[in-house]
Image (cartoon, helix red, strand yellow):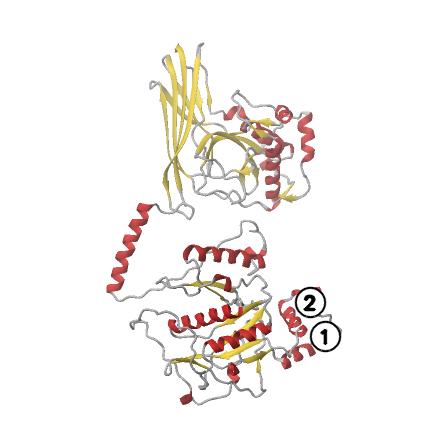
Amino acid sequence: MSIKVALRHHTRYRYDRDVQLYPHVLRLRPAPHCRTPIEAYSLKIEPAEHFINWQQDPFGNYLARLVFPKKARELVIDVEVIADLKVINPFDFFVEESAEHFPFTYGEQLAKELVPYREICEQGPLLTEWLKKVNRKKQPINDFMVAINRLVSQDIRYSIRMEPGVQTCEQTLERAVGSCRDSAFLLVQVLRHLGLAARFVSGYLVQLTADVKSLDGPSGPEADFTDLHAWAEVYIPGAGWIGLDPTSGLLAGEGHIPLAATPDPVSAAPITGATGKCEVEFDFANRVERIHEDPRVTKPYNASQWSDIQALGAAVDEKLVEGNVRLTMGGEPTFVSVDDMESPAWNTAADSPEKQRLAHGLFLAMEKEFVGVGLRHYGQGKWYPGEPLPRWQYACYWRKDGAALWQNPDLLANPTQDCGTTTGDAQAFISGLAGNLNLPDHFVMPAYEDVLYNLWQEGNLPKGLDLLSPKLKKEPQRKALIEHLQTSLTDPAGFVLPLAWDSRKQAWHSCHWQFRRGHLHLSPGDSPIGMRLPLNVIHWEPLDKREQPQPLSLFQPVAALGQPKTPSSAPLNNDEAFIQTALCAQVRKGVLHLFLPPLTRAEHFIDLISAIETTARQQNIPV
């Protein structure tokens, strides 16, 4: 993302008579170490009759030395800078091993080269007392730089001061207020007292108004802004000169454009020179103008650009239709919590309760924005190697024709909130649902956790192991085992209704599953029961007695979807045909979860969802 700006700095001196202009020195060209890309620079001087000589001072800064052969009534200096304000990470640097922690000592040769930047010229009592506040214990150098910069920023209030020169450290500390150059000079002296090389920097500060308001702090300037500014730089071996802005308490970034960096503020003044005796009027102006902006998330394409993009997209669609081409698209927007971005859940860990809460809030907000009331589906997402369970996935479905898939949002449960639903409610619900699908409830069967497997696991535990030990409960596999052992293994974990659509009879049908052990015992695990059905041990039937669903062609014409069918009052369908798909009902943390069978046609899915909502309304149980 790039924002290019034109920075214009105008300075004018009007004299009450023709006066002699003695040589002037300007330090108004971006310094060689400027990190912000400078694409263009111009300097215009009036009177037009002058000589200009570009030089570099002993510290490498650019100087423009001006000589005026004739007297003049005014002196005008216009600077224009075209800068590309690409985001700069102020911590993008490496540090030599010897300087990774404060305090550290410069090497012998480097110490010689940094002599001008280590000179201490202020040792007043207020400064000496203030230095006692600094934490000098061993600490990471980055933490130290942030802390010392913030400390000066907190103790010295910023004010605009038009008087020339820089306050002494004693004046700044006594008044607890100063301009940017006063705070910068104070920080330079503080750093030198702490054994670090530091220099004074004058330059331009560019601040652009934010695209959107900040959620948790100041949003910055109300309008784009630029002005002359001052800050400090500290020398860290390996990293070089690092900019610290004590006015804001932040490290220097892309908006800090240095013009001169010197050991002493006197050598960094933007303009120095003299004139003959006269009265003078002085005025100046600093303006910044955006001349190019890349579209971005917070400031996307404008209406005209969107219109062009949509027109191009429509033309591409026409070409794809002509060529009988089908495309699919997938994507995963990624975001990080602004309130807790450093915790493991937002960096290395896969999940956390807070992450689910935030994601669910976003999910509901998107549903409201795009759908109104949609069909919410809480399913399992990707399963990564090494993780005990798949990750969760929220999805919302709706019909393009505007017909509602789900009528009453109050009957859609929030999986993060306990509804007080019991296993008995689950049994009543699935029995009622069977009736609404015109099926007898004797097809519903309870599903149990595997007693033999859990007893075998319990028998393999060390003797005397305390299952309630807090340490034991932290490990996911052992925690799951404890939950199973603390639950009565004779109580159903949920209920299962074998279910499929009979295309020949145009009705729902079911069957009885038979097991050698007499009951349906789930495969071991922590996933919903619909993911743990023992489909491999259901009684065997020849292929000719099984209904074989035919896959639909993606290219065959599809009729418009109709309205869902209401529950029928026809006689119950007792006919059995061997099927291996099922609908499951299970209560997890006080919420009734339904696991739907795979279906091949959308109209069958719509009818099943309608029957589920009807049952939820009849029994007043959200799902």
Q: Which mark is residue 462?
A: 1
List the single residue furthest toward the front. Answer: 569
Asked whether the residues under the numbered discs 2 and 1 touch, taking CB atoms below 8 Å apart as contact, a structural biologist would say no
List the single residue furthest toward the left. Answer: 322
Q: Position of residue 128 (x, y in %)?
A: 68, 29
Q: Amino acid at mark 2?
A: Leu
Q: Quadrant of residue 568?
A: bottom left
Question: Left or right: 317 with respect to 471?
Answer: left
Question: Left or right: 46 with respect to 103?
Answer: left
Give the total number of marks visible in the rendering. Answer: 2
Vertically, is 300 above or below 615?
above
Q: Which mark is residue 284?
A: none
Vertically, is 462 above or below 274?
below
Can residue 20 be spotted in the picture? no
Which of pointers 2 and 1 lies earlier in the amino acid sequence? 1
Q: Report the residue marked by disc 2.
A: 472
User: Mark 1 Cα within 10 Å, few/some/many (few <14, many 20+)?
Assistant: few
Residue beneath the point at 25% across and 60% down? 318
Vertically, is 59 above or below 328?
above
Question: How far is mark 2 from mark 1, CA to CA?
Answer: 12 Å
Q: Position of residue 533 (x, y in %)?
A: 53, 78
Q: Position of residue 115 (x, y in %)?
A: 59, 31
Q: Position of residue 468 (x, y in %)?
A: 71, 68
User: Mark 2 Cα within 10 Å, few/some/many (few <14, many 20+)?
Assistant: some
Can residue 566 be spotted in the picture? yes
The residue mark sitting in front, 2 or 1, is 2
